[in-house]
Image (cartoon, rainbow, N blue to C red):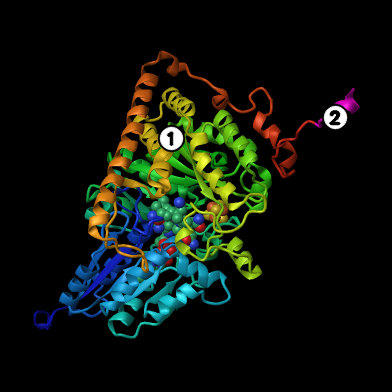
Amino acid sequence: MHGTLAKRAFRIVLIKPSHYDRDGYVIQWWRSTLPSNSLASVHGLVVECAQNRVLGPDVDIEVEACDECNTIVDVAGVAKRIRAAGGGMVGLIGVQSNQFPRALDLGRQFRAHGLNVVMGGFHVSGCISMLPSLPSDLQEALDLGIHLFAGEAEGRMADVVRDVAAGKAKPIYNFLSDMPEMAAAVYPILPRSVVTRVAGHYSSFDAGRGCPFQCSFCTIINVQGRKSRYRTPDDVEAIVRANAAQGITRFFITDDNFARNRNWEPILDRLIELREREKFNIRLLLQVDTLCHRIPGFIEKSARAGCTAIFLGLENINPESLMGAKKRQNKIWEYREMLLAWRAQKVMTYAGYILGFPTDTPETIARDIEIIKKELPIDILEFFYLTPLPGSEDHKKLHMAGVPMDPDMNKYDLEHACTGHPLMSKAAWEKVYADAWTRYYTDAHVETIMRRAVVSGINRTKVLDSLTMFSSASRIEGVHPLQFGFFRRKLRTQRRYGMPIVNPLAFYPWRFVDFVKVCSQWARVILRYRRMMAKVAKDPASRTHFDEALRPQGVHGETDHFVEVFADKIPHTHGAPVMPVRVPAAAAG
Ligand code: B12
Ligand code: SF4
């Protein structure tokens, strides 16, 4: 009978691991800046298991979740809570390659406490999807008794939880050949207490998975597939309502390319309705491709639905590099038109730029960054090393050919040179990366971006804050802005496995000096940029500011200067500009 059932509990602790800085300390913050959608997804699935009482009517499934980027993981505390519940498991969530060494260290500690550990995410899925045999790091995890999960967990979580609870979990779960449908799938959700650890209280969801394109540096197509799968507008509305019920209305929609989501229009219409009729204060951050402006109404509706910023995979402006990486869909001659279309809707643009394509040299990179500054109205440009990420075609090719790659997965964060470059030494490549940030974020260009923001009516505070973070995170904190947060924490005792724990008498004085130095560097940038923005905002000339990057494209039939620079590298595909034949001076003469 109902009331007489003996109650038991099974505690599931979900941890999204971070990774290590160059000194071996975990990269974590008082507040992080971006939410983890992997954590939200798996949390949603485990909560469903709890609601459905998948371990039987007498077992309460208790769930806790944390993102190590903004929360210190207390291993002994977790072990104590699981033991107090009478059993449970630790899930290491959404582990990317760069997070694998940290995840392994956490797993090792939890295993030493005798706990069940299951790990999933792109490193496990990418390696199993692309490599002919298990790499040694995954084998090490198995040897520690950690269970690996490859593929997506929608529709599979209950089985995993049951297996673990019964002590019958498999070493490897592999669902890579069977992608779950997204329509009506359980949706990502996190409790407010986890979301508020992200600055700005952003949460996230994916409205679709999979991508039809074929970029050779990308892992997504080999893990989530090239067939796109989508959530329904009803599900998206349910996600937004569930979050709004706990006061969360800002979302990072993590689709790699929301413009290719077949349901983009009904989804945006639904969000527009929620905003305009029910006054939900929705704010969206979207990832889109460089062709999205060609989709009628896409940009306008995104803005009406609350989109205030987009991430764009610009990757490079040299068509030769783009073709080499099979990023054929990026048409450089349309970049400005696309960027101006977003500006017209007062949406801020963040563009990713990859350094180290085979034909890149320090000179061509310097030239290209100067061209971007002058001719493309991008607000924030962020740089990455071209990296053979496990799970990508690039990685597989190098692996199969036996080309040396850095064995330390902690470095596969797109902030390190992980393999050789045909034209640049490692030192030259590293210098190019460091210089790229300072070359783009000169005071003169920062001021131009501020003037462009004023004249285009883009939120000044947002631009100012982003300029502050992106110009200096790499230089001051030694981390990419996408991994940045507010107030770095370094725990003396949480150091990379194998590195010594420093004596407190040496650690705390070092940490004090380190902290004060970093704070004063930030204070200087913050003050300088704030003064600059105040000056720009006061200057009447800002309201009529105009420069080459804001000139509408080709209105008088002329070709952009930067398109001319790359004229001989543009493939003659449909829609490409036809360049006038250049007659050599001698022949003309
Ligand atoms: C949103 C996003 C971010 C966000 C949020 C991170 C997050 N994971 O949510 C931000 C901006 C912070 C980010 C940053 C970075 N990212 Co990112 N990111 C993505 C993106 C676009 C979506 C992630 C997502 O939500 N996927 C959907 C979830 C549900 O999939 P999933 O994580 O695989 O989880 C499913 C399964 O794996 C499984 N599963 C996962 N964990 C577990 C655990 C258990 C116990 C079980 C049973 C199952 C299970 O179930 C889940 C549900 O089906 C992906 C690309 C992609 N399409 O996934 C890149 C991606 C994950 N990122 C990548 C990279 C490299 C980075 C950065 C290192 C680089 C950079 N500088 O940008 C940083 C790292 C910083 C950090 N702290 O994470 C790579 C990782 C490749 C690799 N081999 O490591 C990817 C794949 C993109 C790419 N370039 O190929 N990223
Ligand atoms: S990099 Fe972006 S566009 Fe290219 S295949 Fe990956 S997800 Fe698709």
The circle on residue 347 is 1
Q: Quadrant of ligand 2?
A: bottom right
Tell me the SS state at disc 2.
loop
Determine which quarter of the picture holds residue 534: top left
Tell me the SS state at disc 1.
loop
Q: Quadrant of the C terminus?
A: top right
Q: Nearer the viewer, residue 340 or 493?
A: 493
**Magenta part of the chain:** 581-589
Q: Are there few (<14), some (14-19), or many (20+) residues within 10 Å of tag 1?
A: many
The percent coordinates of residue 543 (x first, y second) are 43, 18
Residue depicted at 30% across the width and 85% down the height:
167
Q: Is residue 307 above or below residue 219?
A: above
Q: Nearer the viewer, residue 563 or 189?
A: 563
For the residue marked with disc 2, what is the amino acid?
Answer: Pro
Ligand 2 within 8 Å, label 2 CB: no
Q: Nearer the viewer, residue 438 or 238?
A: 438
Q: Is residue 44 visible?
A: no
Q: Quadrant of the N terminus?
A: bottom left
Whether the magenta-drawn stretch holds residue 360 is answered as no
The percent coordinates of residue 15 (x first, y second) are 31, 64
Residue depicted at 63% across the width and 69% down the height:
402
Q: Is residue 566 visible?
A: yes
**Residue bearing the label numbered 2:** 584
What's the CA distance linking mark 1 and mark 2? Answer: 43 Å
